Image: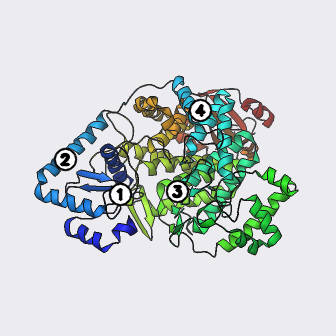
Amino acid sequence: MERESFENQEVAHILNQHYISIKVDREERPDVDHIYMEVCQAMTGHGGWPLTVIMTPDKEPFFSGTYFPKESKYGRPGLMDILNQIHSKWTEDRERVVRTGQQIVNALQEHRIKTKGKGELTEETLAKAYEQYESTFDSRYGGFGQAPKFPSPHNLAFLLRHWKLTGEAHALNMVEKTLESMQRGGIYDQIGLGFSRYSVDEKWLVPHFEKMLYDNALLALIYLDTYQATGNETYADPARQIFTYVLRDMTDQEGGFYSAEDADSEGEEGKFYVWRPEEINEILGKEDGERFNRIYDITDYGNFEHSTSIPNLVEKSLEQSAQEEGMELDELKQFIEKCRVKLFEVREKRIHPHKDDKILTAWNGLMIAALARGSVVLDDEKYAEAAARAVEFIKSKLLREDGRLLARYRDGESAFLGYLDDYAFLIWGLLELYEATFETDYLMYALNLQEQQFALFWDKEDGGFYFYGSDAEQLLTRPKELYDGAMPSGNSVAAMNLVRLARLTGNDDIVRLASEQVSAFAGDVALYPQAHAHFMMAVQFLFGPTQEVVIAAPSQAAAQEMVQEVRKHFMPNAVVSVVTDETREKFLLLAPMLTDKTTQDGKATVYVCENFACQAPVTTVAELREKLT
């Protein structure tokens, strides 16, 4: 609509004559987007973007829809006709229009009151969620449901934890099949690395080429978890490659991470990413080019628009290609990497899609979490260093003088009071960074933000966190988001943060708050648990069994051998802390229950506890390994 209507003089004339036009960046004002999307869904039965809402001067909506063509055609109303008709009604019968707006607002507020609310979740709810995933799983191409397919990595993260807790092999199968299929598909940028937003087909072949920071952060996390759980290097590579893409293309020179890259360039979606076979041959030479084309499905006929091809491995694995090309698998991989680098260098000379260089606190929090976890699982400090730089960026650019978190930074300007997602996602990142570095300051900052989050967002009557703060602009309603869609909701992440903070600190107030947070939404979650995968992970953690691993050591260096052993194990319901002589005083202020966790004979000493009940401490790696397996 931007090009078709909003840049058109005829449309602009009508808008300027009869309306006040407001364009909302939904990433900067997700509070406005959430509320009016709910209005659109209630009025039309569906939603989506672009979102069109017409409202009274009192901000009461009375008309909504998604895409409208400029002019009416094929029985579909056009924007110009709609604007003229609504202007006529506003002029001739304003009272009725205003009354309609008031009725919609009343219905919206009543709907909020009627949510299922508090309750209690059980093991049966977890089993029901698994059954729902199983019933919608695509056994041929992975993923869930029909096209378009979104990665939604938290669905896979729930299933991976379900496999760990129950031993249900099919849960792991669903995770691995989906991860392998996505990695082989066109949704994965086989030349430049990183994932696109979603696939328009069931095979993961043709993506909507837009690349989002949050998708890549969440996908890195699930690939890392699966690598740690299975030991299969196949899952480590995509995580490393996502980080290569983000640190190369999406990182501000001061350490923050940009938001997204558009799908189109030169007016065509995907043009930057597709190839013709003769282009490949020209760059790689005839023999290597033809081999590369065979491996990556680049043909004269093409698999995309205008007979172009999206490089992919959908129909043929690397193992199959190695056999067909008469090569060893490692030899083939070396050949592919050599070619990929050459093609990437040429592709860099093309006109790039627009980069959305605003820096959002929430999405940076997700990438901080992913990089910190990457440092742990891949044993590579540079990822933790990048995460730490991003934290410093947020502290220097996205904090008000009184410590209030802000949501967006761009071109030297910080703006918009932080939403629940900003707090919850950044706290998640800080918790991961603490367990990557064991620097107590990160845990302290996470607790500080958690305290702010409670003061600004907590619903004192019914529990749960509102989406925007009590100090923010008050809109038609004050929603509490729970649905785990393309991203997990702030309330789901907050639930998991609270459970982890409770286990790390033993703080009674946080323990109680974690329980209240889960209880506040139990009624809604129990109705359809599959829609709340990240929230269900917090429930899994709460139900246990859980482990608290405390390593007491004279120094960080002395603790390293034990830390490395712990990191070999996939323990999703565990928290790990390190208390050294240097950090003990500061750490015990946060977690006084650990006072008696001391070194024995001056050696690194590990306490493995379940629900705060600790087994006898161990001082050797062999003893520790036995307790963790």
Q: Which residue is mark 4?
A: 134
**Label 4 or label 2, whichever comes before in sequence order:** 2
Q: Residue sitting at 43 percent across and 40 percent down?
A: 482
Crowding at mark 4 (Cα within 10 Å: few <14, some 14-19, many 20+): some
> Given contact means CB atoms under 8 Å apart, are the residues at marks 1 and 4 in contact?
no
Q: Which residue is mark 2?
A: 100
Q: Which residue is mark 1?
A: 74
> Given contact means CB atoms under 8 Å apart, are the residues at marks 4 and 2 in contact?
no
Is residue 94 depicted above or below 264 in this figure? above
Q: Which residue is mark 3?
A: 364
Q: Which SS class for mark 4?
A: helix
Residue 510 shows in this picture: yes
| Disc 1 to disc 4, C-alpha distance | 40 Å
List x then y, in percent, for residue 297.
71, 59
**Label 1 or label 2, whichever comes before in sequence order:** 1
Is residue 165 depicted above or below 260 in this figure? above
Crowding at mark 2 (Cα within 10 Å: few <14, some 14-19, many 20+): some
Q: Amino acid at mark 3?
A: Asn
Q: Nearer the viewer, mark 3 or mark 1?
A: 1
